[in-house]
């Protein structure tokens, strides 16, 4: 057996070899002129020809015709739109490969490839810091599947060797599944980033509030029980809900990211810092309002309520990098709506029910004061939405 070149066997004491054109030429086995014309005709039609050799002599050939799924061409076009460059690496003859490439509208084609040729091509791309996904089904594809950053084997028609070498197996052998997998992967990654963005920006807002109060010589805005309440409820509930954000096809318009790129990029940290600044500013305004009305305890109550509610509103900011306040997408996550309503109900109960005041170290608010807390918290939402709009405009003008 020559991996990727041919398969040998003993049949009734006769050595039989099924091989490709390249191995036939390496072994200097001649093909009768009568067969050459038929083989060339098959190749011109884009068929694959397997040569049969018995005891070192040409015995015949098999003609195979590859079929292309109707949806594959559309999937290739989608991958190109995603800045993913599809490349055809095949051991087939030039004509057979050209016929397939023409149907799929693929421009880069490498024919008569042996396993080492495929591995060499992949290694060259990896040296240029390019990520490579390799798809294959045969024994000859196994080394390349192992070499690639992501090896994808066919689950139905693929060999066991290919499946073992691959990192992923397509159970339906459908190329369109790759595009769907890219979409799902990008959405999951986006949801994780949204949850992290929510947690970091909210916590940064709280840190800024404490820092500003300390620099101004004012009392600490939050009691330990306030921070415990925030971490257990107004942090965890929206963060979990953002992780369950419905998938959106807008992620397919993003450029591929580097495989070793950190989540905490300069752009991401910039968004976290700006959003945290807005939340911290509104919380500080709430603290000062209460402090000037009736001292430190009322100021702490204002700050606690404003920060909790601002973070609940902020969950809607973290749904997308684009403004969503006046769109249907703002209300397409029932889990986030539930987290908001539950969190708002709990913090309102803490601020309004006298029996809870000793436990949570807050002062009773009247309806006007409660309305101010909700107002300060809500204002952070349109401000951040406006900043997102400005950010997009500046980015477009920069391009």
Image (tube, rainbow, N blue to C red):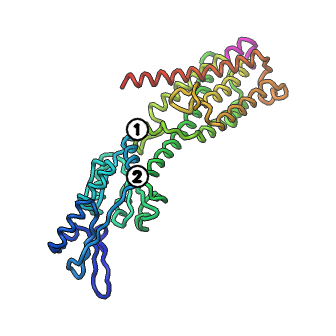
Quarter in which the N terminus is drawn: bottom left
The answer to whether residue 30 shows anywhere in this view is no
> At 40% across and 52% down in the image, what residue appears?
70
Is residue 133 magenta-colored? Answer: no
- Closer to the camera, 193 or 174? 174
Residue 306 drawn above or below residue 54: above
Pointer 1 residue:
255
Is residue 296 magenta-colored? Answer: yes
Distance between mark 2 and mark 1 Cα atoms: 27 Å
Question: Badge 1, how many Cα within 10 Å: few under 14, some, many 20+?
Answer: few
Residue 206 drawn above or below residue 183: above
What kind of element bears circle 2?
loop
Residue 366 located left or right of residue 252? right
Farthest residue to the right: give it. Answer: 355
Question: Badge 2, how many Cα within 10 Å: few under 14, some, many 20+?
Answer: few
What kind of element bears circle 1?
loop
Farthest residue to the bottom: give it. Answer: 13
Q: Which mark is residue 218?
A: none
> At 40% across and 38% down in the image, what residue appears?
255
Which of discs 2 and 1 lies nearer the camera? The answer is 2
Residue 91 position, x and y percent, is 28, 62
Res. 349 image quadrant: top right
> At 75% across and 31% down in the image, what residue appears?
346
Which segment is the magenta one?
Answer: 287-297
Residue 240 position, x and y percent, is 63, 40
Q: Which mark is residue 70?
A: 2
Residue 86 located left or right of residue 365? left
Quarter in which the C terminus is drawn: top left
């Amino acid at each position: 057996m020559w991996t990727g070149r041919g398969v040998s066997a003993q049949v009734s004491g006769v050595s039989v070899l099924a091989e490709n054109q390249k191995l036939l030429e390496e072994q200097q086995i001649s093909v009768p002129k009568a067969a050459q014309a038929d083989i060339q005709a098959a190749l011109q039609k884009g068929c694959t020809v397997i040569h049969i050799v018995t005891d070192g002599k040409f015995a015949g050939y098999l003609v195979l015709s590859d079929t292309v799924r109707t949806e594959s061409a559309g999937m290739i076009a989608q991958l190109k739109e995603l800045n993913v460059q599809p490349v055809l690496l095949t051991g087939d003859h030039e004509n057979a490969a050209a016929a397939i490439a023409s149907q799929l509208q693929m421009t880069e084609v490498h024919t008569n490839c042996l396993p080492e040729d495929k591995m060499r091509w992949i290694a060259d791309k990896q040296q240029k810091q390019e990520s490579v996904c390799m798809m294959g089904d045969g024994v000859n594809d196994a080394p390349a599947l192992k070499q690639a950053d992501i090896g994808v084997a066919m689950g139905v028609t693929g060999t066991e060797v290919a499946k073992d070498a691959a990192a992923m197996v397509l159970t339906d052998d459908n190329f369109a599944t790759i595009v769907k997998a890219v979409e799902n992967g990008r959405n999951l990654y986006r949801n994780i980033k949204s949850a992290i963005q929510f947690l970091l920006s909210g916590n940064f807002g709280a840190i800024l509030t404490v820092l500003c109060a300390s620099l101004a010589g004012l009392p600490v805005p939050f009691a330990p029980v306030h921070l415990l309440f925030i971490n257990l409820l107004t942090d965890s509930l929206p963060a979990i809900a953002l992780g369950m954000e419905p998938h959106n096809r807008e992620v397919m318009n993003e450029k591929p990211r580097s495989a070793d790129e950190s989540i905490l990029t300069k752009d991401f940290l910039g968004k976290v810092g700006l959003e945290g600044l807005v939340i911290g500013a509104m919380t500080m305004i709430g603290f000062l309002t209460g402090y000037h009305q009736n001292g430190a305890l009322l100021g702490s109550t204002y700050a606690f309520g404003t920060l909790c509610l601002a973070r609940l509103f902020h969950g809607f900011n973290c749904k997308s990098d684009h403004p969503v306040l006046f769109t249907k997408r703002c209300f397409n996550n029932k889990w986030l709506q539930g987290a908001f309503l539950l969190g708002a109900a709990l913090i309102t109960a803490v601020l309004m029910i006298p029996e809870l005041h000793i436990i949570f170290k807050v002062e009773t608010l009247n309806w006007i004061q409660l309305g101010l807390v909700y107002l300060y918290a809500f204002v952070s939402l349109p401000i951040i939405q406006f900043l997102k709009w400005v950010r997009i405009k500046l980015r477009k003008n920069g391009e």
